Structure formats: structure tokens, C-alpha cells
Image (cartoon, coloured by chain):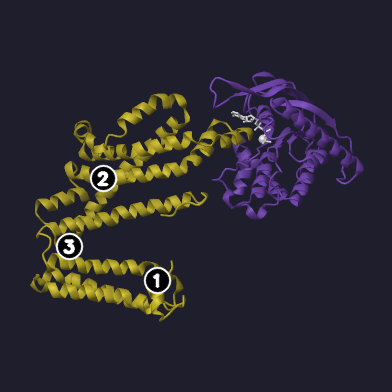
Amino acid sequence: MKPVAGTNAVGLTNNQSTLSWLMQLAVPVATLIAFGVHLLFAKNAPPLETHSYILLFWEILGVSIVLAIAQTFWAGLRQWMRHMWPIFTAAILLLGVWDAITLGFHLLPLPYFPGPAAVLRSLISDRALLLDSTWHSLVLLLSGYTLGVIVGLISGVCIGWSSSVRYWGMPLLKVVGPIPATAWIPFSMVVAPSAIVSAAGLIALAVWFPVTMLTASGVSNTRASYLDVARTLGAGRAYLIFRVAIPAAVPNIFIGLFMGLGASFLTLVVAETVGVKSGLGWYVSWAQGWAEYGKVFAALVIMAAFFSTIMTLLFKLRDRVLVWQKGMIKW
Amino acid sequence: MVTRNVVAASALRVQEVRKSFAVPDAPGTMRLVLDSISFSVAAAELVSLIGPSGCGKSTLLRLIAGLDFPDAGKLLVGEEKILGPKAERGLVFQDPNLFPWLTVRRNIEAGLVARGVLQEKRTEVDEFMRLVGLEAFANSYPHHLSGGMAQRVALARALINHPKVLLLDEPLGALDAFTRMRMQDEVLRLWENRRTTMLLVTHDIDEAIYMSDRILIITPAPGRIDRKIDIELMRPRDRTSESFLRLRSEILEHLDLAGKTTANASA
Ligand SMILES: Nc1ncnc2c1ncn2[C@@H]1O[C@H](COP(=O)(O)OP(=O)(O)OP(=O)(O)O)[C@@H](O)[C@H]1O
Ligand SMILES: [Mg+2]
């Protein structure tokens, strides 16, 4: 990652072996600005609410100064800071802006839009329940997603490989597949033995459609010449399916996995909101019922971290599996 | 040196083979690509096919490999009719067609894996990798290889099955002159050691004369065998000898003539 254009223009250090002063100071200065904004507006807020937020500022300030010193002997850290610092700086400044909009000028109606300090306070005070909800969401998401992927891969390979399965399966897929999984909620609640099972089934259904569709198209579009080569090498049907058609379809399959993951997040939250009595979706609607909007926002923060972590893991997996691909786009 | 065990060679017979393809722009019409092709290759013989682009050489090799079927005529290996692809009939395609998801080593192993004999024959993988000079690239993926390197991998991949009949569709086309000559000698050595029956498609007249026992010249539209030339020069052959050069100009003249007559015919 190149240093930001501005750091070179300052001319204090053009040298790659050190981080420019502007870069080193960016995070501490941003922290002080956000801190200042907070102190300015927090005078009329209850001190209990702002206490942990202020502590957080001191922590960020301390850590950023320690890192600024550590990077002078540690090149790997410097590289990472060069890449991450601009975005961290922006994130911290955004906290200040948020503070100013909510607590400062009351531009957004209270209590629906609490300031960052109140959200942090909810996050800390309700951490046990939040952790428990996250755990429940994770279990539900993974069980539904895994089931959907397994079934989707099997049906996708069958549809993609066999023309008779394609003849009967494709129309069904085209008609039933596009219905959003959440539209089945009334039906699934009647059929499934419990709300959890119904939610897992809905998530699986949401994942199944894109995974099947993309696996089938990947398998059926395997280059004929790869299959021909394998056949002249003495390959039987199992080799052709598992060692030619499926590997050739992997780039497509990953697109299906990503689409399915997005659909599964949506279905998870909706299912938890309407049926399941646990998980982050349930937590949001529960907190809303008590008009505790700090907690609503706290749950949203957790969701953002939770979902983006899972997404990142899937990206990492893809990068490992698809090393063979030429000119792969890195997102 | 790759194994000394001699594969029992078998003769290949092509009898009155015709093949046509549907013309995509004009539905319902068929274009004749190969017209009553007949020839046979004796066991352990090396025969070259030469002819202008589009005359049906690759189509013919696909028929012999069992990937396509003729409209009429017969194809036999020994006494056995060709009913589909088999590991004993190896084909090196015109494009290397390496599996992009496998490393060089795993590409070369593919035939052993497909036949379920990888365990017993693992040591041969190294021998073939050495043969084509790609030990250093064992763990590279095909997109890191040059065209010539990819073609060498494709050659090793076909050779590892020890086919009785080896069909080569311009296997050395993408190589530079030096590597090409070295590989010609390597292929000849393999052929001599194994007594494999080989059918080689090439555009290079020198290569055809240098390597083969016999050259079949195919004329296009539709593809027909126009001439069969026996090459009776002693091996190893000298590319600069008088008799070599005489053969060369004879074939060139013939191709030129054949080109003119077809041009007139189509005009
Ligand atoms: N699957 C196919 N469908 C329709 N036409 C085909 C097909 N395969 C080959 N042809 C046609 O058959 C003719 C012969 O093709 P072929 O690939 O055998 O030529 P070739 O002699 O190998 O040429 P080159 O030296 O350029 O490789 C061409 O006109 C081609 O368009
Ligand atoms: Mg060809």
C-alpha cells in the first residue's frame, strides 16, 4: 500500500523505512479531536454514561502512541499501519461527528438515536446477553448455511451434469428458487417442529437456491476439452465429475456461496425477529420493545462485526482454494 | 532414460472413413470434412500427417482417439473396433489443455489417478517431469507456464500412461527451434524404446521427414489422403543431407501443387 499522497507532500519523511509524522500523529490527533467534541457536548449527559467512552479514548490514545513508537523497529507493523491508519483515523473522526449530530446539536430525534457513549455503555452493561445472542445466531446461521450448501452442491452437480435431471429439476428451480426464503415463514412455522428448526430450514433454503444455480451452471459449462483430455487419459465418470467438472466449477460455486451468505444473513435476522426467541435479531426487537435504543445500536454494532467477520473468512477461504486462477480479482 | 519395458505395439487401421459437420450458419446443411480416408499404421511405425490448416487432421485424430465417431467407415486398433476413448490410445491435443486447478506435477499424474494406479507408479512421475525438463516447476500452476512449457507438460501427461498408440496433434508447435529439436529426439527415443505406434500431425515438413517412417499428405475440402511417401533414410537422420533436402523440396512442390489445384477447384 502506498502512503497517502499528502504524507509525501509534507516532505518530512519520504523514506519508506519510517512512517511520516503526519501518519504517526493522525490517530492520536483524531482521538483528541473526537474526545474534545465529546467533552464539549457531554456536559449535560449523565457521567455514568460517558465514563467508559472516555476510558476508551484514553485507551486508543495510549495504544496509538505505543504503536507509533513500536513501528520504528518493526517493519511489518509499519506496513500494516500505513495501510490501516487512514481508515482508523476516519473512523475515529466519524465518532466525533456522530457525537456532534446526536448529543451536540440534537439533529436526530432522541431517544431513537443515542450518541456513541450511550451505545458503548449498553454494549458493556448488556454484554452477557449480547454474547449469548451472538452465540445463538452463530449456531443457527452455521447450521442453516451448512445444510443449504451441502444440499445445494449436490443438487447443483446433479442438475449441471445430467441432462435428464436438468430437464426435470431446472423448471422447479426456476419457479421455486426466486421466492425469498422469508416468504415461506407462515408455512414453515406450521410444518417445522420448532421455531429454531424452521429458521434453520429457511436459511438453508435461502442458501440452497444460489448455490444450486451457480454450481449447476459451472458444472454444465465445463470446457469440453478438459473432459476430452480426461477421457483420453482413461478417466471414468467419477473422475470426470469429481476431478474435472467440480474443480472447473469452483469459481462459480464461490459466487453462489457469497450470494447465499448474504441471503442467509437476511433470513437469519428476519427469522429471529418473528419466531425464534434468541439471537441478535430477537435481541434487536426485544430492546426496541423496551425503547432501549442504545441496546438496539449495540446489537447492530455486534451484527456488523459478526457478519463482516464471516464474510472475510469466506474471502480468505476463496483466496486459498482459487490460487490456481489466473488474474483473480482481489476484493 | 525412462523405463525400458517395451509396450506391445498394435497396428492401427482406418478404412473408408467419412466425417461431416453441421454448418452453423446454414442449418440443415452438412460439410464434408473427411472423405473416404483409408490408411494403416503398422505396429511400432511412426507416421506423420501433413496438410494445410482446416483439412481435417485434428478431426481425424479425434476419431482415432474415440472422442468422435465417423459417419461411415471403420477404425480399428489391432482387431478391435474403436468404440470410445481409452488410456491405451493417448492423445496430445493441439492446445495443451492443462487442468488449470492442478499443479504441473498433478497434471502429469492425472492419467495415473484416473486409472487408479498412482500408488504403484508414483516414481514415474519424477522421470517424466525430468524428461520434459520441468522439475523446477513441479508445484507451479499452469498459468505460470509459457506456451512451450505447457505443451511439454501435456506431452508428459499423455506419455505417463504408456499408450500403445500415441496420437500427437502438433505437440511441438509452440516450442522454439532448439527445444523443438531436442524434444523431437526425445520423442524418437521414447518411440524406439517402447515400440509405440505413433501418428504425428505437424505443419513442419522438416519435422515430418526427420521423424517419420511415412508421411501422409492430406488435401483439404474435403480432406483426402493425397499421397503417401515412405521415408527410407537411415536414423539418426541428417537434416542437411542431400537426400533429406531432396525429399523436402519434393514434398514442398507437392503441397504447393496440391494447394493450387484445390484453389482452382474452388474458384
Ligand atoms: N465440432 C465441429 N463442428 C463443426 N465443424 C468442425 C468441428 N470440428 C472441426 N470442424 C471443421 O472441420 C474442419 C477441419 O478441422 P480440423 O480442426 O480437423 O482442421 P486441422 O486440419 O486440424 O487444422 P489446423 O492445422 O489448423 O489445426 C474445419 O473446417 C473445421 O471448421
Ligand atoms: Mg488441428
The quarter holding residue B56 reads top right
Residue at image coords 87%, 42%: B245
Relative to residue B244, is residue A82 drawn left or right?
Answer: left
Q: How much space separates mark 1 and mark 2, taking CA atoms? A: 39 Å
Q: Colour of chain A?
A: yellow
Residue A80: image location, x then y, percent: 40, 68
Question: Amino acid type of disc 3?
Answer: Val
Q: Chain of mark 2?
A: A
- Residue B43 visible in rendering: yes
- Taking depth in this image into account, of A203 and A211 the one nearest to the observer is A211
Q: Secondary structure at mark 1?
A: helix
Question: Are the residues tagged 2 and 3 within 8 Å (C-beta)?
Answer: no
| Ligand 1 is within 8 Å of the C-beta of the residue at disc 1 | no
- Taking depth in this image into account, of B56 and A21 the one nearest to the observer is B56
Q: How much space separates mark 2 and mark 3, taking CA atoms? A: 23 Å
Q: Quadrant of the C terminus of chain B?
A: top right
Residue position marked by numbered label 3 in the rendering: A119
Instruction: Check chain identity for marks 1 and 3: say if they share one.
Output: yes
Question: Amino acid type of disc 2?
Answer: Leu
Q: Is residue A287 above or below residue A272?
A: below
Residue position marked by numbered label 1 in the rendering: A5
Among the chains, which one is purple? B
How many neighbours does mark 1 have within 10 angstroms: few (below 14), some (14-19), or many (20 or more)? few
Relative to residue A209, is residue B3 drawn left or right?
Answer: right
Residue A104: image location, x then y, percent: 13, 69
Q: Nearer the viewer, mark 1 or mark 2?
A: 1
How many neighbours does mark 2 have within 10 angstroms: few (below 14), some (14-19), or many (20 or more)? some
- Taking depth in this image into account, of A59 and A253 the one nearest to the observer is A253
Q: Chain of mark 3?
A: A
Q: Which mark is residue A266?
A: 2
Residue B207: image location, x then y, percent: 79, 41
